[in-house]
Amino acid sequence: MGQTETFYYDNKIVRNFGVATALWGAVGLTVGLIVALQLIWPQLNFSLPYTTFGRIRPLHTNAAIFAFVGNGIFMGVYYSLQRLLKARMFSDTLSAIHFWGWQLIIVAAAVTLPLGITSSHEYAELEWPIDIAIALVWVVFGINMFGTILKRRENHLYVAIWFYIATWVTVTMLHIFNNLEIPVHFMKSIPVFAGVQDALVQWWYGHNAVAFFLTTPYLGLMYYFMPKAANRPVYSYKLSIIHFWALIFIYIWAGPHHLLYTSLPGWAQALGTTFSLMLIAPSWGGMLNGLLTLRGAWDKVRQDPVLKFMVVAVTAYGMSTLEGPIMSIKSVNAISHYTDWTIAHVHIGTLGWNGMLTFGILYWLWPRLYNTGLYSQKLANTHFWLGTLGILFYAIPIYWAGWTQSMMWKLFGPDGILVYTNFLETVTQILPMYRLRALGGTIYVVGVFIMIYNLIKTAKAGSLVENVEASSGPREVHTSTKGEYWHKWIEKRPVQMLVAAAVLVAIGGLIEIFPVMLIDNNVPKISSVKPYTPLELEGRDIYIREGCVGCHSQMIRPFRSETERYGEYSKSGEFVYDRPFLWGSKRTGPDLHRVGDKYPNSWHYNHMIDPTTMSPGSIMPPYPWLKDDEINTKYTAAKIKVLQSLNTPYPNGYADRAVEDLKAQALGIAEDLKKNGVEKEGLENKEIVALIAYLQRLGTDIKPKQSVGLQ
Amino acid sequence: MYKYILQSAGNINWMAIFALLTFLFIFITAVVLAFTKRKEELRHYASLPLEDGIKE
């Protein structure tokens, strides 16, 4: 070993990301609590567009995933990476750009989502300029991370760093593919994929956002912070190697389990199920590796709140990764999909795994960053119990709600007719469970605020050690020896590790997605399916803006219980002009794919203005502004042109007369509304008319006589 | 049992079989390589989080 070098770890950037984690955690979870309360008391939507469930539910999910967990990832990576590599971060400037860039993106999301600016792709709702900003900041993070890896003093890359590398490369790939879109204007884009293809790419992304944003980086943090907190090495390093390669390879294939029994080709669904089941093995290998790290240290777990948080986190990871594969078995998914079971499942993951591990890391880090003791162990213990009980109070009622509702949807009487024909009955039945869920959420959020108080007091008791002095010998120049196996070789070569991880995850993506893109047979065409009229197109964009997809699916599965309730099951060929697809993933309200021609226009009008007038007891928020706001036709022609460039068969030059057609169709609907007692001046120019046009079109193309589409 | 689960998953065609075989290749390779490592090296790797070079 050469001469010892002295250097400094950057603690300030870790502190900054830590503060952002706690702050955005409080914001994201509080917004989550608000949306939970809106489901019990719809009045809390305040009849305002910006505070309506459909718009702020994505604010909650984005804040929880990208603001809370995202900052948590960066906090943990910036702390552990420097120490594992025995090097300061590559560039303090890049660290700062990364930090402030990420916070600005979060602010942009917090502004645009309540404004209704959304792509409607779940967990990828942000519009194209913000997508580009995310890509740039992510690249800055990558350069900073790889720069640090390249200037490291420790030859070997610890397993946590492999997880960080896999995270970076996969998120890059997912983000690019799922956001391939053509801008219509500054805050509106149209995705290049349509219908089934769009659904497959979206859920390939959506599933892997869970896998490579909520899981792999946190596994890296687990492999670093659990040994630190327990002061003993990981139980089995061999197991961690197997865990890593098996997990990143399998995860990428499992996305189609979000689309079972949909119009997705059967083989793609089969892949999703098979790989989801296989996921149990590496996931549980990782969980056991984490828990067994505490072997012989369980006495410490009784004393130390940090370890308590970590044990619950890893246990929640194990429970969630067992439950996920079980939910991917088609017969189980037939029951769980579209219900609150899914919501319970993801919250075991986010509140349990991500939340509790983040809190444990924060409690461990803060005294070290501020060179003092934790202000109150008692408060940390209180937080631990509030967090744990909060999860239970959250999850158990909505598991119950999910099962109850699913059973009610599927229940046939002895006469062969659905027992609960009115969807609303299945909603009001589970409202008590929703109340208990909100109680659980409140308990959890109270715990987070107690933590913030404890961390502030800890920080005030000490002072931030911005730069920590450390020393190490320079990196040994590695010379390969004969018979050296390649894994040792790759563990010392970050670039090759990056390429290997990229190849592995790309295999899954390519095999799964490319055939659907290229082979026509996968999406059989239906000749009666026509593009949307300009008015329907504008109505569809209003549907997207208001986040209707958050509560209403447009995908009737081929079950008798669904075809009896909603009508003919959905065919893949019906969605070829759907950009983006709007199949949804949760039915807080009924499926809407065959709602076209089901009710008169006036029913929709009254229902949108105040849902309880048509459905007493409904928890759907009112949308009174739709009757006052005018349809924006400024971009109608531009939308038609973009769709034409994507092979939507509008006639040549149609963009120029699109607004004319739009007005004619709107006039027809407005006259019909007037005939049926709706009195309002200038109704033909109002947004409500466009939305009604879209709703009345839904699912009617395979009933040609009633089709009102573009002929 | 596993046959039932796989059958209920739908049509298991060459895509799924290819995926399964590739996975088995990766998995077996990782297992073999993990178990052929020298013990002292593994000990060193596993202890990396505990050796951060900070001057006390």
Image (tube, coloured by chain):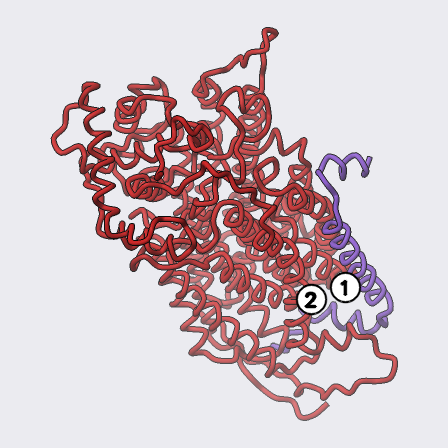
Chain colours: A red, B purple
Of all residues, the one furthest to the left in this rendering is A681
User: Residue A355: in sight, yes or no?
Assistant: no
- At mark 1, the secondary structure is helix
Residue A237 numbered mark, or none: 1
Q: Is residue A482 left or right of residue A542?
A: right
Mark 2 and mark 1 in contact (Cβ < 8 Å)? Answer: yes
Q: In this view of the protein, which residue sits in the foreground, A640 or A514?
A: A640
Image quadrant where residue A241 sits: bottom right
Q: Earlier in the sequence, mark 1 or mark 2?
A: 2
Residue A159 numbered mark, or none: 2
Q: Is residue A696 left or right of residue A145?
A: left
Q: Which quarter of the rendered picture does the C terminus of chain A lie within?
A: top left
User: Residue A501: in sight, yes or no?
Assistant: yes
Q: In this view of the protein, which residue sits in the foreground, A35 or A139?
A: A139
Residue A555 numbered mark, or none: none
| Amino acid tagged 1 | Tyr
Q: Is residue A368 left or right of residue A46?
A: right
- Please state the horizontal and vertical placement of residue A18, each as a whole percent of the image: 47, 61
